[in-house]
Image (tube, rainbow, N blue to C red):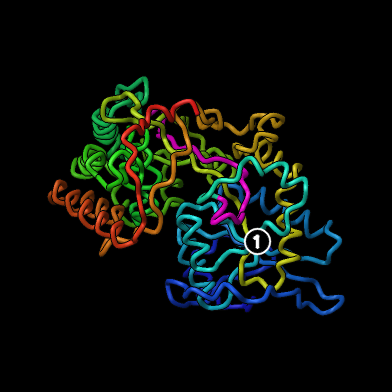
Amino acid sequence: MKAISKTVCGSLALLFVLSGCASPSPGPAQAEKKPDNEAKPKSEAKPGEKVKINYWTQERGRADFLKSKVEKFNQTNQDNIEVTLTILSDNYAQAVDIAFASGQAPDVFNVGSAVLGPLSTLVGKNYLEPLDGYMTPELKQRYDSMRAEGTNMYKGKMYSFPNYGNSYRLIYNVDLLEKAGYKQPPKTLDEMVDAAKKITAAGKASGIYGFSLPYKSAQSAMRRSAQVIATQSGYESSGFDFKTGKYDFSGYQPIIQSFRQMWADGSTLPGSESLDIDPLRAQFAEGKIGMYFSAAVEPGVYDKQFPTKIKWAAAPVPTQSGNPGGAAYLEGGTWVGISKDSKFKDKAWKFLEYMYSKEILMETQEVAGWLSIVPEIVAKAKVPSIAGTEYFLPGKYDAIWPLPPENIKPEGKTSDQEFVDYILVGGNLDEVIKRLNQKYNAALEKSGQQVKPDPSFDPVKLQGK
């Protein structure tokens, strides 16, 4: 991969690189689709030279763990391979697109990040190499039962394997909540709004506010909050209604209204509109935020990345009624994959095989604190000792939802952007939802996908699965 300037490294918000700066240079925001019939490149390193493999991820909360595993591989592999690890921030999706568009794509990258979109999108952009031809008997035995079309497999081809699952919770400062009169975390949206207001009233003079989200990225903010509440309430996160086979965003009305109310009340940390998730975490670690929403990576974040002395905890997300009508979505089913553009696919596979070894998978739970969803690992691995992990153990009200229609591209702004605009500026939420219903259903029709309604679909039945 070509070396580039420090300016580009800064613009991509590069947080950590093992063995140097290897970020992509500026280019189009979206990569052009390349033909899928190119011959498989062979390793081009000269005899005696190390083959350099670039590995990208956004898993900042486990940086130390990933660094140690890459270092061990570099020291012990017998194939003369040197892996460079690059860890990116909330601009991960943009960086990946730029890298592929400019011919500087990583050899191996994390494909499990929600910000990259569904697997079909990555395959459609010709970013990923199918892994079926590389799989060893051991990997086939481990993962054959976990093949899932649209998740780690597309049109019968496997592109990544499962490792850990990401559950989502309401994360809160225990002391701030208790000072606001709440001995238990809020279970309803109204309680959440009230608690945020009371935390702010008690702490505003000291720069303490009741709530925050990383509104700088609408997708990041909504993915970790409103969409989780929607699924816990019984509504599919993208707004798709399986019963009717149409999009209907009306289930979001009370959720988005509660976020708007916390903004209008002044209960949201000032400047949240320009915050990425890491600066928000830093503020929470300093005791300046009462509540926010995020995923199972947070215990690792507060153990290593932002060590904190505050007393924090996490709880199931609140709903309008306080009673779950569905199950909060559980992310999982993929982890890392090989770039279609890699010149060293055979060597990239050697590294991938190492990362998916039983030893590393066991350590991802026991040491790094990720929560495995691989049955063989779940049966043998110890529960992570990292404080706070216990709050994120998948339970009855966490589930992997069925997939909605893929690659639906509405005209204009996405639902995430529309909702964040309303939260920050106000307006007519009913009109926003009406507009979203119209343009998403128009996009669904334009996509040509044949969607069959399922009147019997019951989100409550996802509970306990």
The type of residue carrying mark 1 is Leu
**Which region shows up in magenta?**
152-175
Q: Position of residue 95 (x, y in %)?
A: 50, 67
Residue placed at 26% from the left, 64% from the top? 411
Seen from the viewer's position, the closer of residues 375 and 383 is: 375
Q: Is residue 164 left or right of residue 437?
A: right
Residue placed at 70% from the left, 41% from the top? 142
Q: Position of residue 271 (x, y in %)?
A: 30, 53
Q: Which residue is mark 1?
A: 85
Seen from the viewer's position, the closer of residues 219 and 250 is: 250
Q: Is residue 445 left or right of residue 39?
A: left
Q: Position of residue 46 (x, y in %)?
A: 82, 79
Query: Where, quadrant-wise, is the N terminus in this rendering?
Result: bottom right
Residue placed at 32% from the left, 46% from the top? 240
Residue placed at 71% from the left, 63% from the top? 348
Q: Is residue 202 left or right of residue 352?
A: left
Q: Is residue 399 depicted above or below 423 in this figure?
A: above
Q: Position of residue 220 (x, y in %)?
A: 40, 52
Residue 157 in the magenta stretch? The answer is yes
Residue 430 in the magenta stretch? The answer is no
Q: Can residue 273 be seen at all in this image of the molecule?
A: yes
